[in-house]
Image: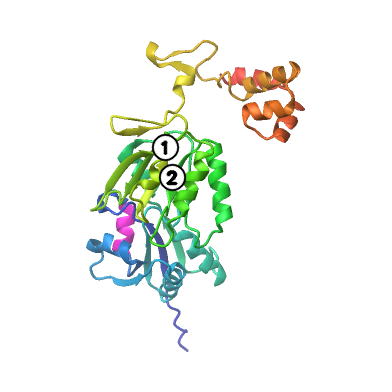
Amino acid sequence: MNEAYVPTAGKIMLVGIGPGSVDHMTKRARDAIAEADVVIGYVTYIKLVADLLEGKEIIRKSMTEELDRAVSALEAARAGKKVALISSGDAGVYGMAGPTFEVLFQSGWTPDDPVQVEIIPGASALNSCAALVGAPLTHDFCAISLSDLLTPWPTIARRLDAVAMADFVVALYNPKSGRRTRQILEAQRLFLRHRRPDTPVAIVKSGYRRRQNIVFTTLDSMADADIGMLSTVLIGNSNTFVRHGLMVTPRGYANKYDMEEGGATREGERAGRSLSTGLLGWLETLQAEHAAGDSIETLAARHRLPADYIRDTLNEPVEAEAAASEEAEA
């Protein structure tokens, strides 16, 4: 009696193609497309890798058909095909990795399933755009999408307000479209509650693509610039500056070292140790300020931190062991 034929399960490769230029794709991304039987993606992304698609089955989808792309990828993989499901930038940053796993889990897929899944990283828009304008992301940063197609606006607004207050450098994805024109204005308004009007802003449109355009502006003027769905908006923090056409966010070396004296440590600072205003130093200062009569509310306002956090912190005085531990680490 002949055994029943069981077809070989395929594979889904979630490929981040980077900013769009083949030169900026990883070797693994190019190899994944080369070994794929089927390539699935948004029509614009398919065009970006057209030179790599000879002999492939190509499934083109529109902008709002992300779940359809994932379903098509799973169907092709179940049929034994290798599938390259492509995203611009990185597949895991506003890309196809998330919706694909949602579809997979809904279908009952587990990591032990015969259909394999590989995520192939690529340079996201914030990395690509930052490289084109200088070094704006050298310190803490975050990314926020202004698209409210899937996320309620109050959620987006809360995130914008929080990161603006916390002084993050911010990359705004999906800042504006033909129908969504007010979101960028609301983002600007929220940021101006916490940031100086002259805060540096860089707007990169179609980075590393044929119609690349870069504009340097300021927070109070950014909404006047040409911004669309192919733009990424980089908003600096309180220390970001633009010089000689380059946007730079200092890492903080000047807090510890005298940059004009050959990098010698400043008074009260030591190389390899936390700043005098780092955690332990700040805790000691906080205790001293409170002992001098400053209320919790006054301290919260001064340090721009929640009052309950200040209260709890004051109830946990600096331990000698912690200071000794830091000395040992130094």
* Residue for badge 1: 137
Front residue of this view, candidates 128 and 148 = 148
* Amino acid found under the numbered disc labelled 1: Leu
- State the colouring used for the structure image: rainbow
Quadrant in the picture for residue 9: bottom left
- Residue 256 picture location, percent across and down: 49, 18
Q: Residue at 46%, 59% (x, y): give it.
A: 97
Q: Could you tell me if the residues under marks 2 and 1 are in contact, i.e. CB atoms within 8 Å?
A: yes
Horizontal relation, residue 123 to residue 108: left or right: left
Badge 1 crowding class, 10 Å Cα cut-off, few under 14, some 14 to 19, many 20 or more, is: many
Q: Is 59 drawn above or below residue 138 in the view shown?
A: below
Which of the pair 329/227 is nearer the observer?
227
Indicate whether residue 34 is drawn in magenta: yes
Residue furthest right as drawn: 315
Q: Position of residue 272 (x, y in %)?
A: 51, 20
Q: How many marks?
A: 2
Q: Could you tell me how far apart the alpha carbons at marks 2 and 1 are, in whole angstroms?
A: 9 Å
Q: Which is in the foreground here, disc 2 or disc 1?
A: 2
Q: Secondary structure at mark 2?
A: strand
Q: Is 158 within the magenta? A: no
Crowding at label 2, few (<14), some or many (≥20) Cα neighbours within 10 Å? many
Above-or-below relation of 103 to 120 = below
Magenta stretch bounds: 27-35
Residue at label 2?
A: 171
